[in-house]
Image (cartoon, rainbow, N blue to C red):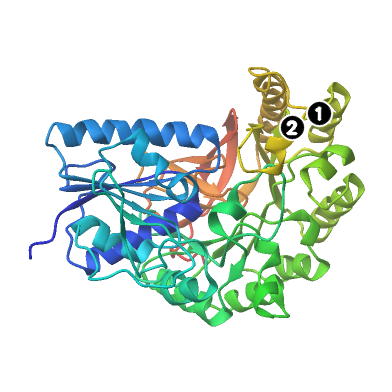
Amino acid sequence: MEMPSVSFVSLGCPKNLVDSEKMLGLLAEAGCPIVSGDGGSGDVMIVNTCGFLSASRDEAIGILREAAAQKERGEIKRLVVAGCLVQRDGKGLIEDVPQIDALVGVHNRRDIVRAVTGRRPSQIKKGAKTKALAGASAEKIEGGNGSMLFLGEYHASSWIDENKSDTARLRLTPSHYAYLRMSEGCNQKCTFCTIPSIRGPMHSKNVEEILSEARELIDDGAVEINLLGQDTTSYGLDIGYRPGLSGLLRELNTLDGVSWIRLMYAYPSDFTDVMIDAIAENEKVAKYIDMPLQHINDRVLKSMYRRVTRKQTETLLAKLRKRIPGVSIRTTMIAGFPGETEAEHRELRDFIRDFGFDMLGVFPYSNEPGTPGHKMKTHLPPGTVQEPRGRIDADATRGCVQAAKARKGEKMRVMIDGYGERGVYAARHEGQAPDVDSLVFVDGGEYDPGEFVNVKVTGSREYDLLAKPDTRSLTVLGH
């Protein structure tokens, strides 16, 4: 049987991107030709969706309707939808977009080949507590268009057997950096968040599995590895790995061929002194921490169920800056949480201004059905949440622009991120993560992506730094 060609659209966060890369790897292994570029002209289009916020759902539905129109015009033969929005909305997506041929939930990604080919299993397993265990079965919608469903809830044994490994991925990132998922799911119970209901409870990979994946990524050209998880600071607690995150970082630091190991999505209440030491003492661990704080006012933090106070947050931030010289700290905040007063909002703005984060993102509160926050009685009037978000965004912009200006004359080591245009190369220093942070634009020289270069900052353009080569490194690893 000739396998259909596949085009792929990946939406959402880097954690979703890892799922996309794994599914592409499974399809390529099965013999499906992969059409390069989002939304290409393959026989089958796959859209891996994000379902974290209502805005993400709106974006996905818009893309799915465009794909449905392509199917109606005969440009594609089959439309497959995967990811978080599938796990969240299930059959509801079929009602919005009847042209969908198959749905693949986040715990069922090994079913992607059957979803693409349209071949059904010989029988449905009996006695399963879920609609379909991962990799086990498909269901035909009663009275629908015959769409295939692969919609299992999280189940420990099926996830371990079918979905845990992220090896043999067909990567969508440039070859010189990669994302490595160290855990899936979350045990935190933040009142605004849909992730636990979509991804399930936290389940960590063991150290050897992570090291094996890291070696594969390094062999594939990655000199930067970005560690992912819904809550990276709780790594290992669910599997009884006593050294936890600090032990994992020290193990990863022993690997040859990698220069930056970056920690993303750290949770503040579980950030320990030994974790700080591990970041400070291991040369390959980037002096960079992405730690979403969400707010600083004690009442709001309690309402969010963040399990941390302002004083504890300030103590942790002070430790990080004191004990990790040169550390860059990125955070995100939520504006307009239910019940937030003008005084509490001002407290958050003052805190952001006084601390001076290296990078900051701000989101307007999104009232998500199924979360405890949805049931709160003190939501801001519709249409007004964007106003407090805009104030924080303006504050953060001013702070980051001033910080960029202050770096003029500084010398730093940067990694080239892409091929140059007219002799100018986009690059990043150790305190800049891919896709979400600012850049360093290096003017002069000839470099390849993944090469490390010593530069001197000559100026700035908003968040971004402008630089000239100082003393060029001789190897791509920067040794």
Q: The N terminus appears in which quarter of the rendering?
A: bottom left
Q: Residue at x 65, y 19 (%)?
A: 382
Residue 340: horizontal and vertical position, in percent? 81, 28
Residue 68 position by quadrant: top left
Marking on residue 340: 1
Residue 43 appears left or right of 270: left
Left or right: 178, with 382 as reference point: left
Relative to residue 23, is residue 165 depicted above or below? below
The location of residue 33, given as percent across then percent down, is 17, 58
Q: Where is 335 relative to 439, above or below?
A: above
Q: Is residue 318 visible?
A: yes
Q: Nearer the viewer, residue 101 or 453?
A: 101
Q: Position of residue 328 (x, y in %)?
A: 69, 49
Q: Which mark is residue 3?
A: none
Residue type beneath disc 1: Glu
- The residue type indicated by label 2 comes to Phe
Q: Which residue is mark 2?
A: 337
The residue at the point 44 percent across, 77 percent down is 161
Residue 310 x/y as whole percent: 88, 45
Q: Evaluate if marks 2 and 1 touch, with contact meaning CB atoms under 8 Å apart.
A: yes
